[in-house]
Image (spheres, rainbow, N blue to C red):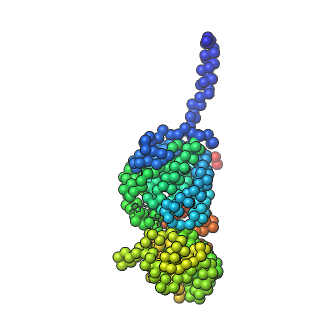
Amino acid sequence: MDISQQEIEQIVRRVLTGMDTKAPAPQAAAGVPRKPVDAPASAACADGVFDRVDDAVEAAWKAQQAWREFKIADRQRVIEAIRTCARSHVEEWCRKIVDETGMGRYEDKVEKHLATINQTPGPECLTTEAISGDAGLMIEEYAPFGVIAAITPTTNPTETIINNTISMISGGNTVVFNVHPRAKRVSADCLQALNRAMVAAGAPENLITMTREPTMENVDLLAANPKVRMMVGTGGMGMVNALLHSGKKCIGAGAGNPPVIVDATADVELAARKIYEGASFDNNILCFAEKEAFVEAPVYDSFLYCIQREGAYLLNEKQTQQLVDLCLKRKGSGYEVNKDWVGQDATRILAAIGVNQPASCRLAVCEVSAEHPFVTVEQMMPILPIVKVRDFDEAVACAVKAEHGNRHTSSIFSRDVMNMTRFGRVIETTIFVKNSATKAGVGIGGEGHCTMTIAGPTGEGITCARSFCRRRRCMLAEGGLRIV
Ligand code: NAD
């Protein structure tokens, strides 16, 4: 084929003008899927699940190099894909959690998942702060940390993966999870499905990774890996304390033992209804669920009557002791939980001591002293100890002691604003709920966003994308860019 010099010049011109040399931006236009990042390449990788910790970190690190360059609109699109994917798997994952961990209630897990999926904020919460003055323009923005290692609990396995993924990815980070061994199969299913959905929405591969076999040693390897920039732990205090000693920036979401006070001015029917609802939700395995109640003497009998009317079974003294022997174990001079009974249905626990109740019974209650092990141990079972207190002073003193300084969650039923204020000031918990179930404090039946990582020990509180970002300042001096 003969082509003239003029035609050649026209073709070259067309090619050059068609190439936007200024903007081969790494970001995909909204809605346009991107080519996956050139990641990992461990033969052992399957949608983010790796055999070796260092491979999982390396893949997440490579993914982060690409992800940090994506636009906010791309992040929004990927987060929407996470939500859509998770919604379509809620029922499957909830069934699998019950099967694998043997804990909790399917229908409550569905509610918890939907709150997590719908109410965990995305990148929209990363607002820029700007100060403009004679000396110039200052902006402060939320920047990614990089690769985050996240340790997840057995009590909210996929809820925490969904919640942490939305929050951490929104901030431009990537995540290596070390999941709880007792929930590793459903956790891997969840992580792989989310990875596939993110890639289909144009994200790089391996924004979230994990090792097939999670172990305690993995946590040490993650802490030792220089490419991991932050450690986030959701679980018991042993794990949180281990992370705090990792030498890395750490966010710790540890144990609670939430006390609830019912004072003499309370709407007792409301208190009984909400405490029954909250203390039995998912069989009480939630860190923020009501674990012990302190009820002022003038309303005590009425409260006891109302909570039984809601469906609670009132244990007698002998039955209470039988449950202590069954559900707790001696540890030194104190007690610890017998894990076989954590998160079991109240009817199953009661049946084990020969008490048969209808399936509608979700909670057992017992009358005990403030020193009773059911008060002092975070038992995570649908057994609520109720302590009769003389007055409000005693209620506050007992509640503060039972909370063990975790500063996690507490609540009060009262019509006295001064009582509410006083208790709130003294107990210093991250979540303080008035006149509702404590789950309202994470947006389940209350205002505000949802999280499954309540960071009391390190102070980030109800975590969201902001919690997993670094603050960076950009200063333009000499009045530049000011238009006034
Ligand atoms: P857990 O502490 O047994 O396990 C949590 C995770 O930490 C798991 O992945 C486990 O493998 C790992 N782990 C445990 N000990 C460790 C150690 N010494 N070093 C490194 N890793 C370690 O807790 P769990 O039974 O899964 O969850 C229940 C506990 O978590 C309760 O105390 C509950 O209050 C708390 N929790 C807190 C929050 C919160 O947001 N604050 C949320 C859920 C659960």
Provide residue 480's location: percent of width, then percent of height: 57, 44
Task: Examine the rendering and report whether any part of residue 218 can be seen.
Answer: yes
The image quarter containing residue 334 is bottom left
* Residue shown at 43% from the left, 78% from the top: 325
Provide residue 151's location: percent of width, then percent of height: 45, 58
User: Quarter of the picture for ligand 1?
Assistant: bottom left
Q: How many marks can you see?
A: 0
In the image, 139 versus 353, the foreground residue is 353
* Residue shown at 48% from the left, 70% from the top: 342
Left or right for 270, reference 282: right
The answer to whether 231 is drawn above or below residue 323 in the figure is: above
The answer to whether 349 is drawn above or below residue 173 in the figure is: below
Provide residue 139's location: percent of width, then percent of height: 55, 50
Task: Examine the rendering and report whether any part of residue 427 can be seen.
Answer: no
In the image, 418 versus 330, the foreground residue is 330
Provide residue 1's location: percent of width, then percent of height: 61, 12
In the image, 50 versus 97, the foreground residue is 97
The answer to whether 351 is drawn above or below residue 2 in the figure is: below
In the image, 208 versus 5, the foreground residue is 208
Question: In the image as oriented, which residue stretches furthest toward the left?
Answer: 332
* Residue shown at 47% from the left, 73% from the top: 379
* Residue shown at 59% from the left, 44% from the top: 201
